[in-house]
Image (cartoon, coloured by chain):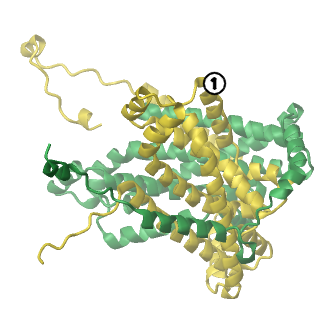
Chain colours: A green, B yellow
Amino acid sequence: MSTHAQASATLPRRPTHRVRTALILAALIAFSVATCLPAIGGVEIDLESITRNWRNGASKLQQLAQPNLAFLPRTLGPMLETLAMAVVGAVTAALVSIPVTLWAARPSNPHTVTRQLVRFVVNIVRSVPDLVYATILVAMIGVGTLPGVVTLILFDIGVVIKLVSEAIDSTDHPYLEAGRAAGGTQLQINRRTVLPQSWPLLTNQWLYSLELNVRISAILGIVGAGGIGRLLDERRAFYAYEDVSLIILEILIVVVLIELLSTTLRKRLR
Amino acid sequence: MSAAARPQLRPPSPAADRGAPSLPPRPSRTGPTVAAVIAGVIVVLATIELDISWTSLGEIPGRVANYLVLLFAEPNWEKLPRALFETWRSVSMAWLGAIGCVALSIPLGILAARGVGPAWVRLPLRWLFAIIRAVPEVVIALVLLTVTGLTPFTGALALGIAGIGTQGKWVYETVESVQEGASEAVRAAGGSTAEVARWALWPAAAPSLMSFALYRFEINIRTSAVLGLIGAGGIGTMLSNYTNYREWDTVGMLLIVVVVITMLIDLISGSIRRRIMEGARPRVVDRTR
């Protein structure tokens, strides 16, 4: 082989991103360090307290490992209340989400201004955490299940509308064009083409929101919004950790059961 | 769905030639009807169980509107510096929690993936993830605060532990979806499990895992406010306190801060995630010069 051939066979230099990688790493490290400075509001990492107090946690876990089954009858009522809240919240949110989802998706609402407005409002609703709604609503309308249900509705609406309207946006819509070619109004097109196509997407999200609702409504009671969370907080205040353990166990079982139910239903939908 | 709506072309059969084509029997609607009735009964029972006083329900919108005016007509901006300080505390909790969660869930999740760890490692890990997924973060925080007290550190720890359930599941699902060719090649060249993970699975799964890590941070931003409500510190604690004092103008300001910060972080993190998953936009080369 001649030297000429060898020279042409040398590979081009591998592209390096050393500077970029260093910058990204430096930014990440700077951010992480800033989050550990208590002076500016960061978290004070107190590993010493773990070595000092780990026995407290261990004994709590030990107590939690012995659920008090005799407490079971008293938990059934609140648990039923929790489930009822989850169902009513999910159904109401489902009803509300049908028109608003169509309003927030491009194919069913070609009007840019109203669509962006609806999306903006939904984004605001979504960015407030669930328990924050519950805290404020309890202060507004009083302790009980109603603030809990309203919290769940607000939470579900955000999830369903955002995910489904984005899914509608990203699918192809030949039917829609057919509807338009046949001279349908936007309302008729939505009713006859977009809505039937979106049922599987919507039902899927509704079931998912029911699943999330059971989880959330189990803890809503901690801020006074009804359900089994109230009992959990009460027993914890009395340091009755065996009862707390039973409640947690019950929440676990119900969450897993609801998850199983919703997974089987969603599989059948597909 | 679309296939069913379209008329099907049937091959000409002798039966069709003889007489009028007989339609297939209508599919039975009994199953769906029964399911709908059961669902309806459950909803009605649930509504009765809630025992909401329907007569007072009419007053609620008026009262809420009244409170909305109290909240947002004149937000109290004087406490904004304090609110931003507390916000940074919440963001710190979320960030440290996300780091802890990701650092733990990536190795555990890779071990729990099919084709990496042996079954006696994989199954217990999956059970662990499932159990953590089912326990609410608040409950984990309630156990932890007996060790580290009501501090932001407890919040960060709770976020780190509570996230492992979902994060670990995402990790093993991502790793399992990686094509098998590369890991087979590493194994054929004599690679160990660790080497398979480093040279075959990691390069393919890393972008998704990084994206999920950022997504965990976004989720934690919301959850850290919730942990604040039970006293872990940060914006949630401030919000809960001022709600108890019924200082509505301050609560309104805090809500605005929460919404703006959450949306801002979603926006930044979302664009970084898109950059990780889709790569850089191709640069436009100006060829006219």
In what element is the residue under mark 1? helix
Side of B270 relative to A211 (left or right):
left
Q: Quadrant of residue A107?
A: bottom left
In-front residue for pair A254/B140 = B140
In-front residue for pair B89/B210 = B210
Picture layout, residue A96 above or below residue B114: below
* Quadrant that contains the N terminus of chain B: top left
Query: Crowding at label 1, few (<14), some or many (≥20) Cα neighbours within 10 Å?
Result: few
**Which chain is indicated by disc 1?**
B
Farthest front residue?
A: A2
Q: In the rendered image, which residue does mark 1 sit on?
A: B120
Picture layout, residue B126 above or below residue B204: above
Side of A192 relative to A233 (left or right):
left
| Spot occupied by residue B257 in the image (x, y as percentages of width and height) | 61, 76
| Spot occupied by residue A170 in the image (x, y as percentages of width and height) | 32, 53
Residue at x 17%, y 32% (from the top left corner): B7
Residue at x 57%, y 45% (from the top left corner): B106
Picture layout, residue B77 above or below residue B198: below
In-front residue for pair B273/A125 = B273
